[in-house]
Image (tube, rainbow, N blue to C red):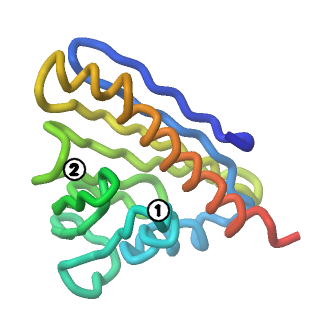
């Protein structure tokens, strides 16, 4: 996982994925990048065929609805609709699935600026459909897939923000 700090825990039918990363950037540069919804395609593995279907998105704002098409399994694409529910510029934002492959998907993006670097902390709280069968699929497939997606994201952000020197 090339230095990626990713942790997945489980409690009461809910999974929580957390990542931590240092970006060698000022908060304005980091916030500009993450507040542009089109940048999500840049940090998503290419094999997933990520495509925003709701048109060219503007800068992120509270209440914004964004729809995507994304490969969740080989040869199987899914529509995914999220809402930006909270935005505190330069500090954090939250997106939540409105429809898509999960029963629950609540993704918090936190940014802490310290002396020329930004610490980014993602918290994803999610629930898999299909009860015990869904948990088994999570153990066999989804967990690994999420680790691969967030490791790719970590490495891509490292390349974008930390390879300038």
Q: Position of residue 85 (x, y in %)?
A: 21, 55
In the rendered structure, the answer to whether residue 14 lies left or right of residue 160 reads: left
Query: What separation in Å lies between label 1 and label 2 (alpha carbons)?
Result: 17 Å
Q: Exactly how many numbered labels are in the figure?
A: 2
Q: What SS does tag 1 mark?
A: loop
Q: Is residue 163 above or below residue 92?
A: below
In the rendered structure, the answer to whether residue 42 lies left or right of residue 22 reads: left
Q: Position of residue 2 (x, y in %)?
A: 73, 43
Which residue is denoted by mark 1 in the rendering?
Answer: 44
> Given this view, does label 1 or label 2 mark the residue nearer the observer?
1
In the rendered structure, the answer to whether residue 130 lies left or right of residue 164 reads: left
Residue placed at 48% from the left, 49% from the top?
149
Compare marks 1 and 2 and give the one earlier in the sequence. Answer: 1
Looking at the rendered image, the quarter that the C terminus falls into is bottom right
Q: Say which of 147 and 28 sits in front.
A: 147
How packed is label 1: few (under 14 Cα within 10 Å), some, or many (20 or more)?
some
Are circles 1 and 2 on residues that touch, CB within 8 Å? no
Which residue is denoted by mark 2 in the rendering?
Answer: 96
Q: Position of residue 111 (x, y in %)?
A: 53, 51
């Amino acid at each position: 996982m090339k230095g990626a700090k990713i942790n997945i825990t489980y409690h009461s039918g809910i999974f929580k994925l957390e990542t931590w990363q240092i970006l060698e950037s000022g908060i304005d540069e980091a916030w500009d990048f993450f507040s542009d919804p089109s940048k999500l395609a840049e940090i998503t593995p290419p094999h997933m065929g990520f495509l925003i279907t709701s048109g060219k998105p503007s800068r992120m704002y509270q209440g914004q609805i964004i729809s995507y098409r994304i490969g969740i399994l080989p040869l199987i694409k899914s529509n995914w609709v999220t809402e930006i529910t909270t935005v505190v510029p330069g500090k954090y934002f939250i997106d939540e699935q409105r429809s898509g492959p999960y029963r629950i998907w609540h993704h918090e993006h936190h940014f802490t600026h310290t002396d020329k670097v930004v610490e980014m902390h993602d918290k994803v709280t999610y629930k898999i459909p299909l009860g015990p069968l869904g948990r088994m699929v999570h153990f066999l497939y989804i967990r690994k897939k999420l680790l691969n997606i967030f490791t790719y994201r970590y490495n891509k952000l490292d390349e974008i923000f930390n390879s300038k020197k």
